[in-house]
Image (cartoon, helix red, strand yellow):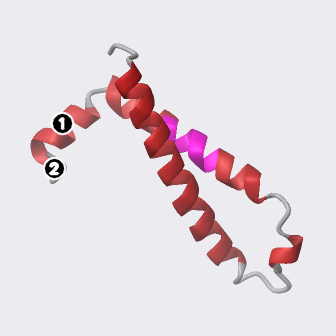
Amino acid sequence: MKLTVQLLKEMLVVGLGFGIFGLIVSTALMYTTPGFSLKKYSFWWQVFLSYAITGALFHLVCEATNINAWYCKNGNAC
């Protein structure tokens, strides 16, 4: 695996996507907790950042282990 500008762009896009969707899902799930309020939700940026980093690293691991190539061959992506 070669670390290229294209791979870094893909990692950024996947990381941002994971961050946005993760923040939405985790916030929605927090509403099931009694007493939850968005006014008390001051740690949203840590939630977003943790999901974004997780998404970017997940993409890197999939690229390094050829999961992306397998998925492109056997999945719906390509």
Residue at image position (64%, 75%) is 29
Instruction: Using a 10 Å C-alpha cutoff, classify the residue at mark 2 as few (fewer than 14 neighbours), some (14 to 19) or many (20 or more).
Output: few
x and y percent of residue 23 in the render? 62, 62
Q: Quadrant of the C terminus?
A: top left
Q: Quadrant of the N terminus?
A: top left
Residue placed under numbered mark 1 in the picture: 70
Q: Quadrant of residue 7?
A: top left
Residue placed under numbered mark 2 in the picture: 75
x and y percent of residue 49 in the render? 67, 46
Q: CA distance from mark 1 to mark 2?
A: 8 Å
- Residue 60 bears which disc, if any? none
Residue at image position (52%, 62%) is 21
Residue 74 falls within the magenta-colored stretch: no
Q: Residue furthest top?
A: 2
Q: Inspect the image, locate mark 2, and give the three-letter code of the amino acid beneath it.
A: Gly
Q: Quadrant of residue 8?
A: top left
- Whether residue 42 sits left or right of residue 32 in the image: it is right
Instruction: Using a 10 Å C-alpha cutoff, classify the residue at mark 1 as few (fewer than 14 neighbours), some (14 to 19) or many (20 or more).
Output: few
- Whether residue 26 sits left or right of residue 2 in the image: it is right
